[in-house]
Image (cartoon, rainbow, N blue to C red):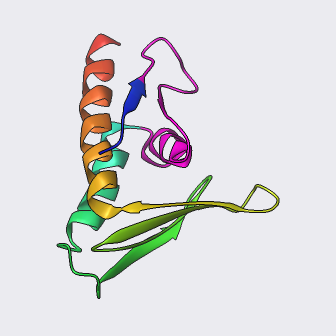
Amino acid sequence: MLTLHFHPESKFDPVTVDPPYDLVGIFLTVEGETAAGTRYVLAGLRALGGDPSKRWGGVGNALTIYANGETTKLIATWEEPERTCELPTEWLIDALERYALFCDGRDRQV
């Protein structure tokens, strides 16, 4: 699983992930952003049920995601050349679950 570094005091980078999975931190912050947004992505990935023949993905604000039940690929198309990160889908699901809990706690403090 990934190690997430939470920074509750930061407005722009509340979570970071060490390379080579640093795009996951960007994905959580920009595409998930809130607990509700994170849970939307979680629902799409969970619906894959570990089945490599099922697909889910899309183009977001900062990254493109292509996922199947086994692996997920994040693509930063705004970088030249574009940068990619591939990881097991279950790792991203776990990271999204932990980030949603972090967002829940942060929202209660506001």
* Image position of 6 (left or right of 23): left
Determine the residue located farthest toward the left in the rendered image: 49
The verdict on residue 96 being magenta is no
Q: Quadrant of the N terminus?
A: top left
The answer to whether residue 40 is visible is no
Q: Which residue sits at x=80%, y=62%?
A: 81
Q: Residue at x 38, y 32 (%)?
A: 4
The answer to whether residue 87 shows anywhere in this view is yes
* Position of 14 relative to 93 (above/below): above
Q: Quadrant of the C terminus?
A: top left
Residue extent of the magenta highlight: 6-33
The answer to which quarter of the image holds residue 35 is top left
Q: Position of residue 74 (x, y in %)?
A: 53, 61
- What residue is shown at x 58% (from left), y 26% (from top)? 12
Residue that appears at 41% across and 60% down? 87
Q: Nearer the viewer, residue 50 or 96?
A: 50
